[in-house]
Amino acid sequence: MANSNPRGIPGAQFFEFTQLSMEDAQNHLEKFQEAIAKYKFMETSIVRRVAGLDDKIPDITKTLQTVQFMKKKKGESFNVLYELNDTLYTKAEVEASEKVYLWLGANVMLEYSVEEAETLLTQKLNAAQETMMVCKEDLEFLRAQITTMEVNTARVYNHTVSLKKASASQK
């Protein structure tokens, strides 16, 4: 294996060979298949993480916009249409307060000042966007490594085919 990316994913090295015995070729093919399986497992894991971030980032953005709106309307009352469920909305008259309540997950809700909430949500949004960028870089790196290993596998497999043909023609 060659060098790794900044997050420690090992790089695949292009396999150079001139002549391999059938046994050596089979050993290399097994190693290549194992490496491909590991890379695909990592790829699947990162794809799941990206999907989670794709759901999370719009939620954080929407919540941050709401907090910023409340900060702008400080002390005023206004009418809102808010979401009760994915398909159910209702109207309410709300007075902008200096406190907001944020769901943190695991059935935990905390009270924050509007400024604290805005800071927290901005930090969470930036962290999620940074993580998304890192995940996409990792996916590109992994796909390149998978391609390299598949090329290695194909080359060695083709070599084994030519060895089989040569041994068959000698008989």
Image: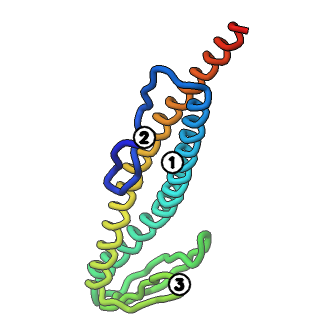
**Closest to the observer: 116 or 43?**
43
Question: What residue sits 37% from the left and 75% below the top?
Answer: 66
Q: Residues within 10 Å of mark 3 (few under 14, many from 20)?
A: few
Q: Residues within 10 Å of mark 1 (few under 14, many from 20)?
A: many
Given this view, does label 2 or label 1 mark the residue nearer the observer?
2
The Cα–Cα distance between marks 1 and 3, rounded to whole angstroms, is: 32 Å
Label 2 close to label 1 by CB (< 8 Å) = yes
Left or right of 3? Residue 154 is right
Q: Amino acid at mark 1?
A: Tyr
Residue 6 vs 107, above or below: the answer is above
Please tell me whether mark 3 sits on a helix, a strand or a loop: loop
Quadrant for the N terminus in the image? top left
Question: What residue sits 68% from the left and 8% below the top?
Answer: 170
Image location of residue 73, percent across then percent down:
29, 82
Image location of residue 133, percent across then percent down:
35, 54
Label 1 close to label 3 by CB (< 8 Å) = no
Indicate which disc residue 106 carries: 3
Residue 110 vs 154, above or below: the answer is below
Question: What residue sits 46% from the left and 67% below the top?
Answer: 56
Residue 21 vs 28, above or below: the answer is above
Q: Residues within 10 Å of mark 2 (few under 14, many from 20)?
A: many
Q: Which residue is mark 1?
A: 39
Indicate which disc residue 12 carries: 2
Mark closer to the chain start, 1 or 3: 1
How many numbered tags mark residues here? 3
Q: Amino acid at mark 3?
A: Ala
